[in-house]
Image (spheres, grey):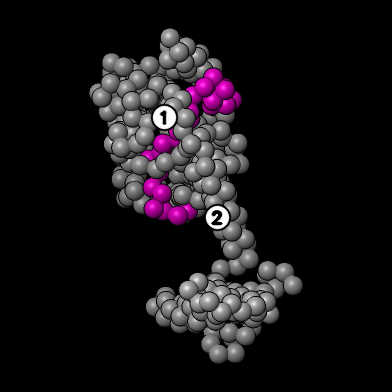
Amino acid sequence: MKFADMLDRQKEFSDLFFSSESFSDAKREEMTKSFALALHGEVTDLVSSINFKDHHANRKTPDREKILYESVDALRYLLAIMNVWGFDQREVVEAFKDKDTFLHTRRRVETSKWDGRPVLIVDVDDVIAHFRKSYFEWLDASHGIKISHDYPEYYASTPLKDRGINPESSFKDFISDRGLRTIEVIEGMVETLQRSREMGFWVQLLTARPDQNLICLYDTYSWLDAAGVPFDGISFSGEKYRWIVQSQFYGRVAACIDDSPKHSAEYASHGLRVISPVLAYNVSLNDVPGVIRYNDSNHLLSILDGIYKETKN
């Protein structure tokens, strides 16, 4: 029996008692609470099949059959919850894959301890990923709004407001449409980051993406994995300088690579070396002391090579 068959078979059983297709969200919430409580009971029964009270001197033989069938009962309640909310096989399998990638990557990052190497703080969007290009293409396809890639506003807020579209809502819709999965990698950046690690840098990704949005969180990890982006650590924060100050890397940051005028200027104002790509919306950085501009990944790599040699002197 395949996973889709299990979903269908559980739905056939649930349909004997109710039809979830006609449920309101309030009713779905009510059913989810009922199934979750029943699931809690099955998990309790499952635990009772093993020696879970360590203070008991008398030990029993674990009941393998009970473990198996109570686990199946627990699984069926989870399947019932998925059916109540109308999740199909594709959604569940993709969510499992996303979570699997996230867990394995997080485990790798958590077990990779910083050893004092000079640190590169590296942004993701428009440093590694062509976010703005993909977002503008989505705006065209979804809303018929054509925006030039050299438009001076990063999110093109003015044209969106002129069309009665909330820029923040539009960004969330782009994430919900799984736009973060389709972004192109900026040419040469995977190789540049790999070479940077080989030089001796610790590559710490630091993005302002909202990790409280689970689609954003898991799609970010999935995209990094699929694109083969090499890195040693990853964090999410809208207050990047504050994050650095509170991190173990403070005092050992060799450079921050970021496209944002806001974050780059803040870094530079606190004495951090900043390397920023030359882009239409960040020309103001040309006049900010401490900001080095680069044109492409080869130019960036040559800058990083010089910085690393400097750290060794």
Per the image, is 76 magenta? no
Q: From this viewpoint, which residue is outermost toward the bottom?
A: 17
Coordinates of residue 46 in the picture (x, y in percent): 57, 78
Which one is in front, 114 or 203? 114
Mark toward the start of the polypeptide (2 vs 1): 2
Q: Quadrant of residue 189?
A: top right
Give the amino acid at mark 2. Lys
Which one is in front, 290 or 134? 290
- 306 shown above or below 229: above
Give the amino acid at mark 1. Ile
Describe the element under mark 2 as helix, strand or loop.
helix
Residue in the image at 45% along x and 55% along y: 214
Residue in the image at 46% along x and 16% along y: 308
Coordinates of residue 143 in the picture (x, y in percent): 44, 48
Residue in the image at 43% along x and 9% along y: 313
Please indicate, yes or no, whether residue 283 appears anywhere in the rendered image: no
Classify mark 1: residues with Cα within 10 Å, few (<14), some (14-19) or many (20+). many
With 22 as the anchor, is 89 left or right in this view?
A: right
Coordinates of residue 170 in the picture (x, y in percent): 39, 49
Residue in the image at 59% along x and 37% along y: 227
- 58 shown above or below 189: below
Residue occupied by mark 1:
121
- 297 shown above or below 223: above
Q: Point out the stretch of residues depicted in magenta.
A: 191-215
With 172 as the anchor, is 187 left or right in this view?
A: right
Q: From this viewpoint, which residue is outermost toward the right?
A: 1
Q: Quadrant of residue 190?
A: top right
Residue occupied by mark 2:
99
Q: From this viewpoint, which residue is outermost toward the top?
A: 313
